[in-house]
């Protein structure tokens, strides 16, 4: 309740749209708390698996014991809540917090599986102009002050305002790419924006860039129908942090509202587990990136 | 692969085609990244002017936007044709 008062009192002022970079810069020492690492999951192209990836990375980080929040930046086309399985528990959303209509604590949806995982849903009714740079910055700072260690920002497709704001404050970017021409080209475009249109870039620093290759099919690569990991890495000049194989469990998981990383028996889930471990600094070899040896009967009859 | 797969298999590696196309277009897009958006139009107009005097190819005029420290440099280069192919030989 007093949280609400705080948000009201801090609401006036800031009619200046382009705040000075100095004012935007994060305060060096907020109490003795460490700052949250802000990870944007982005791609440019739609439908490559950003939301699936955001949900799984957030779950993976929470499973590793990190206090994690995952934010849906796709204002007007909310979907992260469905993938996380909390769509019926949304009361307040990201825009409500940005506009000061609800506190961050009121708006965070606690995950039912991990007590250190929270979801901040996108607004379904507002338009994306309701997002402001100052508003987003305040939400991220509030989350950091609440002791969150990781904040995963699920970017909308495209390179419009929502995508721009999702990446602007990022410390790390996970660029989701499919082994397919339009996705690779769009990823290159996004990498260019990460290197120029982010706070880190403006301060002469770099956003940590990670490539996550999804919907990968080793058998199609072997046949010469699909770009290989090496091809994509060479074209984009960046190593992959994970390769998620095309697998039926991804759709099954989104059907059920359970992020695929929690399906411990699925290859996609295990591949996401590895990707999270690499984000946390572990050294893991890639799995599920070569064609499995087939049995005698499969060889003869195909399949 | 089954024993009858050879009937439907075509002999082309489309992944290589994709890679080659991407390599070219991405290199081109990177070179114009961050440049002002009037560049393509300016390039076309420059080409028209030059073609009034010299018979050059469509891709003979290259306009590059280069960052040199604090300055932005507009680097325009025109590839002239072989001497005997030139229209105006004064």
Image (cartoon, rainbow, N blue to C red):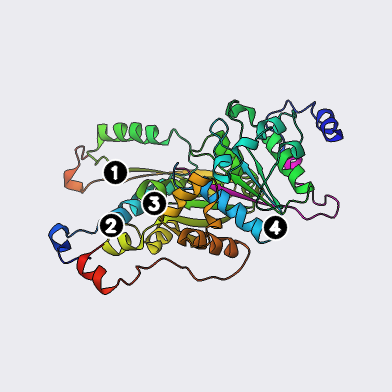
The residue under the point 64% across, 53% down is: A205
Res. A23 visible in picture: yes
Residue nearest the viewer, comparing A69 with B58:
A69
Residues at discs 3 and 4 both on one chain: no
Q: Which percent across, then down, holds residue A30?
A: 83, 49
Question: How far apart in space, not on screen, are marks 3 and 2 (Cα)?
Answer: 23 Å
Give residue A97's position: percent from left, percent from top. 72, 33
What numbered label is drawn on residue A225? 2
Q: Nearer the viewer, residue A126 or A204?
A: A126
Callout 2: residue from which chain?
A: A
Q: In this rendering, would A242 be left or right of B69?
A: left
Q: Residues within 10 Å of mark 2 (few under 14, many from 20)?
A: some
Q: Chain of mark 1?
A: B
Per the model, the C-alpha gap separating discs 4 and 1 is 57 Å
- The residue that label 1 is drawn on is B60
Task: Tell me if residue A238 can be seen.
Answer: no
- Label 3's element? helix
Q: Chain of mark 4?
A: A
Q: Separation of disc 3 and disc 4 at Cα?
A: 39 Å
Residue A231 relative to residue A19: left or right: left
Label 4 or label 2, whichever comes before in sequence order: 4
Q: Which residue is mark 3?
A: B27
Element marked by disc 4 = loop
Q: Nearer the viewer, mark 3 or mark 4?
A: 4
Image quadrant occupied by the N terminus of chain A: top right
Which SS does the magenta portion mostly show? loop
Q: Which residues are magenta?
A: A22-45
User: Is A276 placed left or right of B43 in the picture?
Assistant: right
Which residue is most to the bottom?
A: A296
Separation of marks 4 and 2 at Cα, in angstroms? 39 Å
Labels 3 and 4 touching (C-beta < 8 A):
no
Q: Is residue A171 above or below residue A95?
A: below
């Amino acid at each position: 309740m007093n949280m609400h008062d705080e948000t009201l009192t801090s609401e006036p002022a800031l009619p200046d749209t382009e705040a000075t970079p100095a004012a935007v810069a994060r305060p060096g020492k907020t109490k003795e708390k460490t700052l949250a690492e802000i990870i944007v999951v982005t791609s440019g192209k739609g439908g490559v698996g950003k939301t699936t990836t955001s949900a799984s990375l957030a779950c993976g980080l929470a499973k590793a014991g990190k206090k994690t929040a995952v934010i849906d930046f796709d204002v007007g086309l909310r979907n992260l809540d469905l993938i996380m399985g909390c769509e019926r528990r949304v009361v307040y959303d990201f825009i409500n917090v940005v506009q000061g209509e609800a506190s961050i604590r009121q708006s965070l949806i606690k995950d039912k599986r991990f007590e250190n995982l929270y979801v901040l849903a996108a607004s379904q009714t507002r338009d994306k102009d309701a997002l402001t740079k100052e508003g987003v910055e305040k939400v991220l700072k509030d989350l950091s002050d609440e002791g969150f260690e990781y904040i995963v920002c699920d970017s909308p497709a495209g390179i419009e305002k929502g995508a721009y704001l999702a990446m602007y404050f990022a410390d790390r970017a996970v660029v989701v790419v499919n082994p397919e021409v339009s996705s690779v080209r769009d990823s290159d475009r996004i990498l260019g924006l990460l290197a120029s249109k982010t706070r880190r870039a403006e301060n002469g620093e770099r956003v940590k860039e990670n490539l996550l290759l999804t919907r990968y099919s080793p058998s199609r690569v072997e046949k010469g129908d699909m770009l290989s990991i090496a091809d994509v890495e060479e074209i984009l000049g960046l190593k992959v942090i994970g390769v998620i194989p095309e697998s039926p469990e991804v759709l099954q998981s989104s059907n059920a509202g359970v992020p695929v990383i929690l399906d411990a028996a699925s290859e996609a889930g295990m591949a996401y587990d590895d990707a999270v471990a690499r984000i946390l600094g572990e050294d893991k070899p890639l799995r599920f990136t070569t064609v499995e040896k087939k049995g005698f009967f499969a060889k003869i009859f195909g399949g | 692969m089954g024993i009858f797969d050879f009937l439907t298999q075509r002999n082309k590696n489309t992944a290589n085609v994709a890679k080659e196309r991407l390599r070219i277009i991405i290199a081109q897009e990177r070179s114009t990244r961050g440049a002002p958006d009037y560049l393509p139009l300016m390039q076309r107009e420059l080409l028209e002017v030059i073609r009034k005097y010299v018979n050059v190819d469509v891709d003979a005029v290259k306009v590059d936007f280069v960052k040199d420290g604090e300055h932005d440099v507009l680097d325009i280069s025109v590839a002239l044709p072989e001497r005997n192919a030139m229209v105006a030989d004064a």
